[in-house]
Image (cartoon, helix red, strand yellow):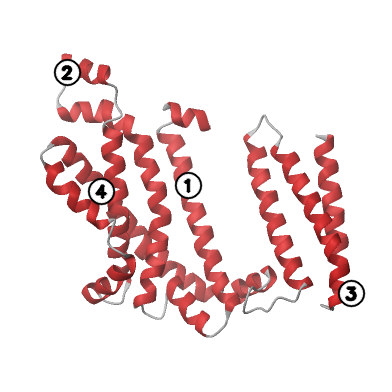
Amino acid sequence: MTRVLMALALAVLAAIGLWWALPAAGGEGERSALLTPVLLVTLLLAAWSVRRVAALDGHRAYGTATAALFGLWVVYFWEVSVSLYQVPRVLLPAPSFIVQALIDRWDILAGDFVQTVLKAVLIGWALGCGLGFAVGVAIDRAPFLQRGLLPLASLTSTVPLVAVAPIAVMWFGFEWPSKAAVVVLMTFFPMLVSTLAGLQAAGRLERELMQTYAASYGRTLLDLRLPAAMPFIFGAMKVNATLALIGAIVAEFFGSPTVGLGFRISTEAAKMNMALVWGAIVVAAVTGSAAYALLVQLERRIAFWHPSVRATA
């Protein structure tokens, strides 16, 4: 722990010194060149500090601390590099400008969040995952459906998103239902395949034991096969959480009311207001990460007994 604290202290002192020297650089070429070695040394010290923290073992909080420290260093060096080398805001705005855009336009981004996430993504994700799960159970119950439904379902994963989005807008209008339809199409097949794989994960001996007890298909499904399939189902739900967000944002590029994260990114990029564009990207990224983390915690609560969950706990 002493070495970890020493590494953190050295890295923080170097970072503070570099930060204080930035205003004196003023973007001039010679001064910026002189500060470049200092930037590289600070980068090495930061990498050393992250490596020391990552080497700690014994508590789950150490992993969270490592990720947080790495993220803070990334933001710091982003800010410093943009300021030191005078990168144009159109190419890459500094994190401080992005945060300022988030604060100044929070009301607009909040409306975009409601339109894209709480309506299109959430509803489309729930419908797509539910439909994929139901079809997966139906195919498992009646294997003859596998020859007809599974090839058709596989087609949904091969249709290009840029081709489906305009058609969905024509069918369902410019509001969120058209984006939810695209999300349903994107999330259906991953859940279907994962459900089928999970239902086959139950051991043969366990199935034969249920047969000796004259258990019905429903009883076997609830008591044996669905619990065994939980890691597969949650894996599909986590993948679909990110796919749904991407699909809804891209779908808004092809027709949307004057609200939505995808609409905001496309319109503000046309105005060269890149700070707000990055602000919308940050909102989407944080939302996707939070949804993934929430599903991970839910999986640990529900399938805590499964070996795959216990191994990561």
Report crowding for label 1: few under 14, some 14 to 19, many 20 or more residues within 10 A (C-alpha).
Answer: few
| Residue 313 drawn at (x, y percent) | 53, 32
Q: What residue is shown with label 2? A: 211
Q: Is residue 12 above or below residue 306?
A: below
Q: Please tell me which of labels 2 and 1 falls first in the chain.
A: 2
Q: How many marks?
A: 4
Say which mark, if any, is on residue 24: 3
Q: Quadrant of residue 142?
A: top left
Within 10 angstroms of label 3, few (less than 14), some, or many (20 or more) residues? few
Q: Tell me where residue 96 appears, x and y as whole percent.
A: 69, 70
* Inter-mark Cα distance, 4 to 2: 27 Å
Q: Which residue in the protein does label 4 denote?
A: 132
**Residue assigned mark 1:** 294
Label 4 Cα neighbours within 10 Å, binned few <14 / some 14-19 / many ≥20:
many
Distance between mark 1 and mark 3 Cα atoms: 45 Å
Quadrant of res 73: bottom right
Q: Amino acid at mark 2?
A: Gln
Distance in Å between CA atoms under marks 4 and 3:
59 Å
Q: Nearer the viewer, residue 210 or 47?
A: 47
The answer to whether residue 161 is above or below residue 229 is: below
Say left or right for 162 vs 270.
left
| Residue 64 placement: quadrant | top right
Dot placed on the residue nearer the N-terminal end, 4 or 3: 3
Task: Give the residue displayed 39% in from the left and 57% down from the top.
Answer: 243
Tell me the distance, in whole angstroms, between the alpha carbons under discs 2 and 1: 37 Å
Residue 170 in the figure: left or right of residue 40: left
Q: Nearer the viewer, mark 2 or mark 1?
A: 2
The amino acid at mark 3 is: Ala
Q: Nearer the viewer, mark 1 or mark 3?
A: 3
